[in-house]
Image (spheres, helix red, strand yellow):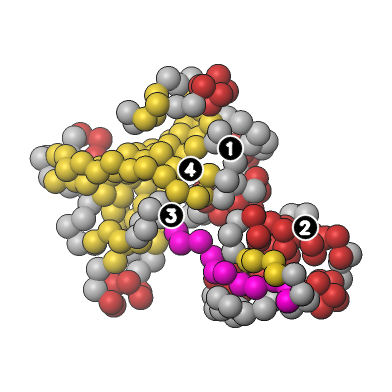
Amino acid sequence: MADLPQYKQIYEALRKQIANGTYAPGDLLPSEHALCNEYGVARLTVRRALSQLVSHGIVIRHQGKGSIVKGTPKGVGLLSLVGTTSALEQSDLSTLIISQPEFRDWTEAFAFPIEPNEEVAGCIYFERLRLIDGVPVFFDITMLPNIDLPRFMEYELENRSLFDLLRSRYEIVVTGGIQQLYAIRADKRLRQYLNVRSGYPILQLNRKIETSRPGFHIYSQLFCDTQKYGLIGTF
């Protein structure tokens, strides 16, 4: 994180402290003066970090009181994989890149109409496989509009959160979305990636995810083996 601008480093540090409960909803963050001393930066830098927390709905600025914690946004579009308590606590989630990011043209994304500005820009396409304790659980395809994402192809996506990357590097935050759910049978590709038999039942999710950047959506298609793991989350 040291290569990020100073205000982003402060934003990420405060966001992490709010997420882990160091600062709970309703708590006051340290004053601008205290944050300047703690991080050794100018007040303008601290104010920029706090403004970003406000714009992302994590903090509320109250005249005369300071910065009040609202809480980190829920994992919109992020599905948690849970089975038994022991599996949840001891599981090791890993990500493999099946298809490296590449530039493509597009006219639609998983039955969702794309925005005109997104169609003109083209997309960045990649595929990933998620494993728990080495067992493949879901396979996903992601399409991002190729709009103001400098050096995106240089970043490592294996065992890394795409949403965290978009937030920390490009100030793009997930805010909501639409998803469609289908029950399907595993085809040849899914049998190979998820290591299941022919005709095995698979849950398919098509998603158009809204973000804090106007005219920029994340499009994804997710295939899940729910035999051992249930899917929970908010959207």
Q: Earlier in the sequence, mark 2 or mark 1?
A: 2
Contact check, label 4 and label 3, Cβ < 8 Å = no
Q: Residue at x 25, y 35 (%)?
A: 189
The residue singled out by tag 1 in the image is 214
Q: Residue at x 53, y 26 (%)?
A: 118
Q: Can you give x and y, in whole percent of width and height, for residue 48 in the image?
A: 77, 57
- Residue 209 vertical position relative to residue 7 in the rendered view, above or below: above
Say what secondary structure mark 3 lies in. loop
Q: Earlier in the sequence, mark 1 or mark 3?
A: 3
The residue singled out by tag 3 in the image is 76
Mark 2 to mark 1 CA distance (whole Å): 20 Å
Contact check, label 2 and label 3, Cβ < 8 Å = no
Q: Bounds of the magenta span?
A: 65-75
The amino acid sitting under disc 2 is Arg
Q: Badge 4: how crowded within 10 Å, few (<14), some, or many (20+)?
A: many
Q: Residue at x 19, y 45 (%)?
A: 202
* Nearer the observer, 210 or 218: 210
The verdict on residue 69 being magenta is: yes
Q: Residue at x 70, y 70 (%)?
A: 62
- Residue 105 vertical position relative to residue 152 in the rendered view, above or below: above
The residue singled out by tag 4 in the image is 210
Q: Can you give x and y, in whole percent of width and height, for residue 6 in the image?
A: 79, 59
Q: Earlier in the sequence, mark 2 or mark 4?
A: 2
Q: Can you give x and y, in whole percent of width and height, for residue 121 in the image?
A: 57, 23
Mark 1 to mark 3 CA distance (whole Å): 17 Å
Q: Badge 2: how crowded within 10 Å, few (<14), some, or many (20+)?
A: some
